[in-house]
Amino acid sequence: MQDAPNPRTALLRDRNFTWLMSGGAISALGDQFSQIALPWLVLKLTGDAVALGMAVALMGIPRAILILFGGALVDRHSPKRILMLTKHVNTVLLAVLALLVYTGKAHLPVVLALALGLSLASAFSIPAGTSMLPHAVAPQHLQAANGMMMGIRQIMMLAGPLLAGLLFALAGDGSDGPEHMRGLALAFGLDCVSFAVSAWTLAKVQPRPFAPAARQPVLKSVADGLAAVWRDTMMRTCFIYWGLCACVIGGVMQVALPLLASSRLHGASALGLLMGAHGAGALLGMAASGIAGKRRAGNLGMTLLLIDGIAGVLLVPLGMITASWQGMLINVAIGVLGGFVQVAVFTWIQQRVPRELLGRTMSLFMFIFMGLAPLAAVAAGWIASRVTLATLFGGAGLFLAGAALLAWMFTPMRALRDAPAGTMV
């Protein structure tokens, strides 16, 4: 009698998964270039922390408003169709942005308009991308598929910022004047190419049969999705907790890290090193999670809250560093902690939610992390202009540690366990 095939081996023989994984890896690598280049471009054009915070918010507000509607459209029209459309849109927008920066015609209003377009596209690509995997692989392979996809993404989050930092160091990041922004232009151009290639690989994917959600007004569809999450006490509690943490931590980090790199370290290359260190840590954390399996500090909820508390403590000294290597060590440690639970949290949601609600639920989950944080960046930018970086990072870290402690004491999150498939309650 032959042993059952290893889930990873079975996945790598699945053409759907290999096409999806290769395209996702290419797109994730390109994203890292733009994620560093865009806030850096705004900072170089304005030199103002408040303007940076407002720019981040402008990019996040439409995404925050529309991402829930994006989830409803994904449930109605299929993740692949929506994701393919957004990849074509992003290819065009990034090509225009790269050309403008390269020719020295990238003025702030035009940059913000193109960033707004990218934000609008992401409101639909995020729920489509996070809902695609359960439609492309067999249910029994979902845990392994999530682990492999997130591992590949973390490798790109490690390689991307480091490559971007090298690109900016060699080709210029605008620190010596607007005429030295060729590195930023190349960064946007590489992201443009990555979207074009990942659209081609996505076209090769043949999803499992899609059962569209019932035809109804989009607002009602969104409301039904929100109501389903709200009725699930554990999921409601987790989403509220994650939302509060995302507002404070996400908003602060999107403003404070570029300011730290600009004012105290070595420019955009240092920002790339800090982000790359976080990606390396997250990859190590995911590897540790794969080795540990479902071993927890009690259960999933207690593990998550313990990790958040430790990460909060680690954030406090980040605002006092004076060298890039110090920030890299802290970011590696924070990344390890976050990576350890990421696969488990994603899989918990995907298994708990019926497939016909998956797009809307994942859109709400991503709204929390990618919609609320840019909104909070306005306040973070205003605060950053009035307090020291040490105070900004210290306050964010103490908030996260305190929130984790209060959640453990007063909410059901401490009883959260890895969910069996299809058990939305």
Image (cartoon, helix red, strand yellow):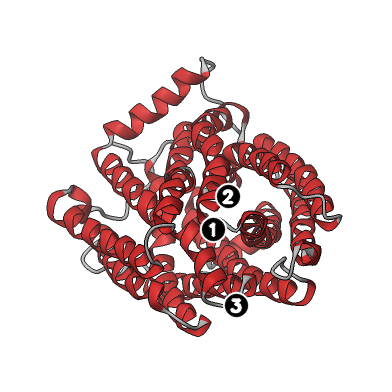
Q: Residue furthest left?
A: 409
Q: Is residue 297 left or right of residue 223?
A: left
Percent x, y of residue 40: 63, 60
Residue placed under numbered mark 3 in the picture: 266
Going from N to C along the chain, the mark reached first, 1 or 2, is 2
- Between disc 3 and disc 2, the foreground one is 3
Percent x, y of residue 360: 47, 34
Question: Label 1 neighbourhood size at 10 Å, few (<14), some (14-19), many (20+)?
Answer: many
Residue placed under numbered mark 2 in the picture: 137
Label 3 sits on what residue type? His
Residue 208 tag number: none
Q: Are marks 3 and 2 in contact (CB under 8 Å)?
A: no
The residue at the point 39 percent across, 47 percent down is 349
- Between disc 3 and disc 1, the foreground one is 3
Q: Secondary structure at mark 3?
A: loop
Real-space CA distance between mark 3 and mark 1, rounded to the nearest whole angstrom: 38 Å
Label 1 sits on what residue type? Ala
Going from N to C along the chain, the mark reached first, 3 or 2, is 2
The residue at the point 65 percent across, 55 percent down is 38
Residue 145 tag number: 1
Question: Label 3 neighbourhood size at 10 Å, few (<14), some (14-19), many (20+)?
Answer: some
Percent x, y of residue 418: 31, 55
Q: Secondary structure at mark 1?
A: helix
